[in-house]
Image (tube, grey):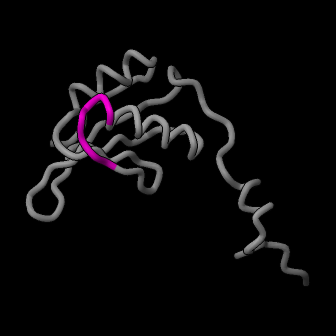
Amino acid sequence: MSNTRLVYSTSERLKEENSLDIDISPSEQRVRLHLDRKGGGKIITIVKGLQLSLESLKNLERDLKKKCGVGGTTKDGHILIQGNHRDKIKSILSNRGYQVKLSGG
């Protein structure tokens, strides 16, 4: 019996093949904006549900941070923005054609 399932590989070619290369149009994506409290009681806005390539996700993160005037990061396919900026982020993403819904908090 042969085991054909690949569990782990260090090959760069395989990593590139498995990455998300196709961006889905914004109108087909349902984005949710969550509020969360991190250590020290600080609030962050989490943008969930984006189905973008890593490069597009980083570009969107950069734009959101610049327009909100705060810091943030990308983690596990979500964008984390420091502070409660749900209304501003909702208007930015809605103008780009995303279907945005506020949830949590």
Name which residue lies at 44% across and 40% down.
49
Q: Would you place residue 46 above or below residue 95 in this image? A: below
* Frontmost residue, 53 versus 34: 53
Q: Residue furthest left?
A: 41
> Is 68 colored magenta in this rendering?
yes
Q: Residue 64 appears at what percent x and percent y?
A: 35, 33
Q: Residue 28 appears at what percent x and percent y?
A: 53, 24
| Total residue callouts | 0
On-image quarter of the N terminus: bottom right
On-image quarter of the C terminus: top left
Q: Residue 96 lies in what quarter of the image?
A: top left
Q: Residue 76 lies in what quarter of the image?
A: bottom left
- In the picture provided, is 87 more to the left or to the right than 57? left
Q: Which residues are magenta?
A: 66-72
Q: Residue furthest bottom?
A: 1
Q: Would you place residue 75 above or below residue 97 in this image? A: below
Name which residue lies at 21% across and 48% down.
44
Q: Residue 51 appears at what percent x and percent y?
A: 53, 39
- In the picture provided, is 38 more to the left or to the right than 32? left
> Is 82 colored magenta in this rendering?
no
Name which residue lies at 29% across and 25% down.
90
- In the picture provided, is 2 more to the left or to the right than 40? right
Name which residue lies at 58% across and 24% down.
25
Q: Residue 92 appears at what percent x and percent y?
A: 34, 22
* Frontmost residue, 47 versus 2: 47
Q: Would you place residue 97 above or below residue 40 in this image? A: above
